[in-house]
């Protein structure tokens, strides 16, 4: 059962465009993390959101956690080729150890110069 | 501070063989988790070790096993390899392995089973 659905699966845009990717679930998560993975590398944590409705900004990236803590979005303003990669969301179902962290399948973003 | 180190980076094996992958966590981190990543299934949790004990296990067959040593280094073993085991195997470490902690991933071992 895929608890976290990410959309779109693939996204190819030109440099300078804006984009939003989504992470949705029917389950409530105590927190949600966003990672970026570049080819040949492991995922790197970008942000963790904890409170429903929380918005966090990381330069041109804006992350939002849904009010009900079931969904999240990542908005990139003026995308650059360096933003290319696989964006993964991961939800923590409840307290405890890392085994309770569920990953989505990711959105593969390609930003063309 | 050195990052998470996984060896080898690439492996080619044939069906029926077994393989051992190694992971050295960040110094001071006591939790090591293993994940399998494939294009179709994404990142799937294999197991987590903390202080040499398996604390959590994902939904994988018994052919997948692991262990952790006293210095927190970890190994995972896959016996009787199948074609479907071809994947990127990622190791991640954190201080205590709590679900809200930051996970630090290695670059992975790309396993191809022929």
Image (tube, coloured by chain):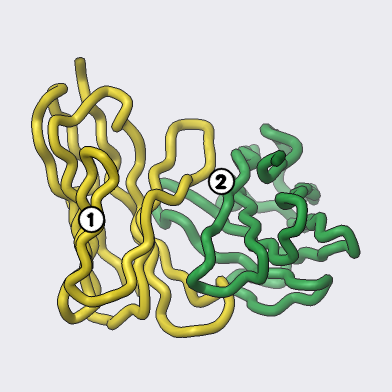
Chain colours: A yellow, B green
Q: B105 or B67: which is nearer to us?
A: B105
- In percent of width and height, residue A98 lies at 56, 71
Q: Label 2: which residue?
A: B87
Q: Secondary structure at mark 1?
A: strand
Q: Position of residue A46 (x, y in %)?
A: 39, 49
Left or right: A64 as drawn, with respect to A27: left
Numbered circle sitting on residue A63: 1
Q: Are marks 1 and 2 in contact (CB under 8 Å)?
A: no
Chain at numbered mark 1? A
Residue lying at 35% horizontally and 67% vertically, measured from the top left: A32
Locate residue A80, reporting x and y percent. Answer: 23, 25
Q: Is residue A56 left or right of residue A102?
A: left
Disc 1 to disc 2, C-alpha distance? 30 Å
Rendering quarter of residue B46: bottom right
Viewport quadrant of the N terminus of chain A: bottom left
- Position of A79 with respect to B1 (left or right) is left
């Amino acid at each position: 059962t895929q608890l976290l659905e990410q959309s779109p699966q693939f996204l190819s845009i030109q440099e300078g465009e804006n984009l939003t990717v989504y992470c949705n679930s029917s389950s409530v998560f105590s927190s949600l993390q966003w990672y970026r993975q570049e080819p040949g590398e492991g995922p790197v944590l970008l942000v963790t959101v904890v409170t429903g409705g929380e918005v966090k900004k990381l330069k041109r990236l804006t992350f939002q956690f849904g009010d009900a803590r079931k969904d999240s979005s990542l908005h990139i303003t003026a995308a650059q080729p360096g933003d290319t990669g696989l964006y993964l969301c991961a939800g923590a179902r409840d307290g405890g150890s890392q085994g309770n962290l569920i990953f989505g399948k990711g959105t593969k973003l390609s930003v063309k110069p | 501070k050195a990052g998470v180190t996984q060896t080898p980076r690439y492996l080619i094996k044939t069906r029926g063989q077994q393989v051992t992958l190694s992971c050295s966590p960040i110094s001071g981190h006591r939790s090591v988790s293993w994940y399998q990543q494939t294009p179709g299934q994404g990142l799937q949790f294999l197991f987590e070790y903390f202080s040499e004990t398996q604390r959590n296990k994902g939904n994988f067959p018994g052919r997948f096993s692991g262990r952790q040593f006293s210095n927190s280094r970890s190994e995972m073993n896959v016996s009787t390899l199948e074609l479907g085991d071809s994947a990127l195997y990622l190791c991640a470490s954190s201080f205590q392995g709590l679900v809200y902690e930051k996970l630090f991933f290695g670059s992975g071992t790309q396993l191809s089973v022929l």
